[in-house]
Image (spheres, helix red, strand yellow):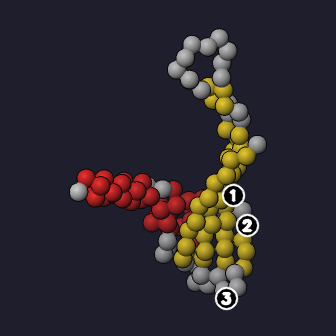
């Protein structure tokens, strides 16, 4: 019984956390709406590709440098310990049909030097 309760709580937490993701927020906000709404909010896309069978894939690429961040190890140190600078790249892709309606939204990100 305790295992079943623990499993139920874990599943509930998993569902709640996936409901808070960036992709789910973007999808719920833009899916089914005109791509004009996206352009009003985000501007012109970085890339536009024609899809086989009609429609387009419109991609927004955002890159930004994240600065060094001090890391606290909880111990006394004479020297500071910092995380390195890193480049964060984000891709937001919108599949748009022939009528200009957003049918699918995907989000991905990557960290690199």
Q: Secondary structure at mark 2?
A: strand
Q: Secondary structure at mark 3?
A: loop
Q: Are marks 1 and 3 in contact (CB under 8 Å)?
A: no
Seen at 65% across and 82% down, the residue is 55
The one nearer the camera, 4 or 100, is 4
Seen at 72% across and 71% down, the residue is 48
- In the rendered image, the vertical position of residue 86 relative to residue 44, given as above or below: above
Q: Are marks 1 and 2 in contact (CB under 8 Å)?
A: yes
Q: CA distance from mark 1 to mark 3?
A: 24 Å
Tag shown at residue 47: 2
Q: Secondary structure at mark 1?
A: strand
Seen at 61% across and 84% down, the residue is 98
Tag shown at residue 53: 3
The one nearer the camera, 13 or 50, is 13
- In the rendered image, the vertical position of residue 3 relative to residue 36, given as above or below: above
Viewport quadrant of the C terminus:
top right
Tag shown at residue 61: 1
Residue 100 sits in quarter: bottom right
User: Percent from the top left, x then y, of residue 16?
Assistant: 37, 56
Residue 14 sits in quarter: bottom left
């Amino acid at each position: 019984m305790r295992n079943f309760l623990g499993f139920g709580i874990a599943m509930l937490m998993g569902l709640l956390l996936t409901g808070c993701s960036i992709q789910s927020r973007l999808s719920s906000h833009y899916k089914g709406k005109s791509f004009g709404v996206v352009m009003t909010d985000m501007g012109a896309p970085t890339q536009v590709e024609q899809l086989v069978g009609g429609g387009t894939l419109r991609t927004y690429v955002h890159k930004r440098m994240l600065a060094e961040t001090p890391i606290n190890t909880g111990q006394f140190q004479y020297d500071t310990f910092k995380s390195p600078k890193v480049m964060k790249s984000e891709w937001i892709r919108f599949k748009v049909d022939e009528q200009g309606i957003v049918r699918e939204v995907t989000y991905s990100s990557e960290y690199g030097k």
